[in-house]
Amino acid sequence: MICILVQACASATTTPGSDRGQAKTHYEKALAFYAKARYQDAVEEYHLALQDWPRYREAHFGLGVALIKTGFYRGAILAFQRAIELQPDYTEAYLNLGVAQSKLAHHGQAIISFRMAISLERDLSEAWFPLAQAYAAIENADSSIVAYDRAVGARPYDAHIALASLYETLGDSRERVTHLQSASEADSARYEPWFELGGILEAEGDYVEAAKAYIAVRDRNPNLPGLLSKLASVYASSGNQAEAAKLYGEVVSANPEDATALFNLAVTYDATGRLEEAIETYKRSITHRPEFGDAYLNLAIDLIEKRSLVEALEAYEAFLLYEREGERRGQVEKIVSQLRAALGR
């Protein structure tokens, strides 16, 4: 979200014959409409103010800001340029001119405008973040990083998240993690940095730390779709099958027709030696997804262990209905042939 500055000062150079008093009345109405988010009404009042007083620079500026809100970016650019003609050192006009130019993907022009605003007011913190975005848009990573670093003071969470995304594009995992951690510190209520960290750690095989990250997500957004399955998966991968089974059970309780969750729950049952529960759960998974090949295969393996050979053969044969040609299919075909011979079929 780009910050738009609104300047409420009404001092300006007069023009002979202009109706300054009436213009100020329209200007004040425009400010009131803007404050109430009635942007089109504000635009109309700014236009009326400028009809009465064409050199009313604050009205040009206000018109530009209101036009950004209505999505008329070309008109906003003209309004800001007119304000700058009337006051060449108009910092806020340069800043918002850059905003409007960015909206139209005129990133090179936006960079010039943002840098002009910064040159007029070196500590203008609001300009660094959109300047960084403009550099990123033209794939100038080095300048974008510098600008985002400068934006950290005013927008720490947004700047660190943007830097993490930029370093992801650059393939620098270490810096990406560093900025995600900084983002989580900048706004401790946000879950997004923790979720992304969890994904990185999970992909790197650090399942214990990934679980900690997903737990941090759960603390902040316990109802996030898919979170329990993510957490269950890393527990299973870390060897904590009991906790994985508990969490997959919660997923299944919330959505009894989730075939994938049922399958994963059955796998955890297998891992903890709960054979009967695994068999029953694989069957439930297949009920909700009849083409679930892996569920048929695991079910068949468990039925073999239970010495339920007829049921195992049926499960293997169902697996073959959905499995494409390949090594795994060839292996199962051999098993099916052996089972049929053993059963006299």
Image: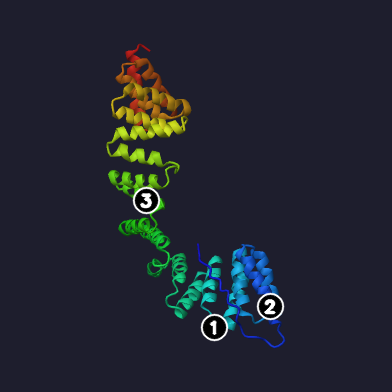
Q: Secondary structure at mark 1?
A: loop
- Above or below residue 300? Residue 157 is below
**Residue 23: which numbered mark, if any?**
2
- Residue 72 shows up from this direction: no
Write down the quadrant of residue 321 in the picture. Answer: top left
Q: Counting other residues with Cα less than 10 Å from the Cα at mark 1, is it few (<14), some (14-19), or many (20 or more)?
A: few
Instruction: Work out which quarter of the rendered image holds the C terminus and state it.
Output: top left
Left of 185 or right of it: where is 18? Answer: right
- Above or below residue 86? Residue 79 is above
The x and y percentages for residue 163 are 38, 61
Q: Are marks 1 and 2 in contact (CB under 8 Å)?
A: no
| Front of the two marks 3 and 2 | 2
- Residue 261 shows up from this direction: yes
Q: Secondary structure at mark 3?
A: helix
The x and y percentages for residue 325 are 40, 32
The x and y percentages for residue 29 are 66, 70
- Above or below residue 305? Residue 165 is below
258 or 304: which is nearer to us? Answer: 258
Residue receiving disc 3: 194
100 or 50: which is nearer to us? Answer: 50
Q: Are marks 3 and 1 in contact (CB under 8 Å)?
A: no
Residue receiving disc 1: 88
Distance between the Cα atoms at labels 3 and 1? Answer: 45 Å
Q: Amino acid at mark 2?
A: Ala
Distance between the Cα atoms at labels 3 and 2? Answer: 52 Å
Residue extending furthest top? 344
Left of 109 or right of it: where is 176? Answer: left
Q: Amino acid at mark 3?
A: Trp
Q: Amino acid at mark 1?
A: Pro
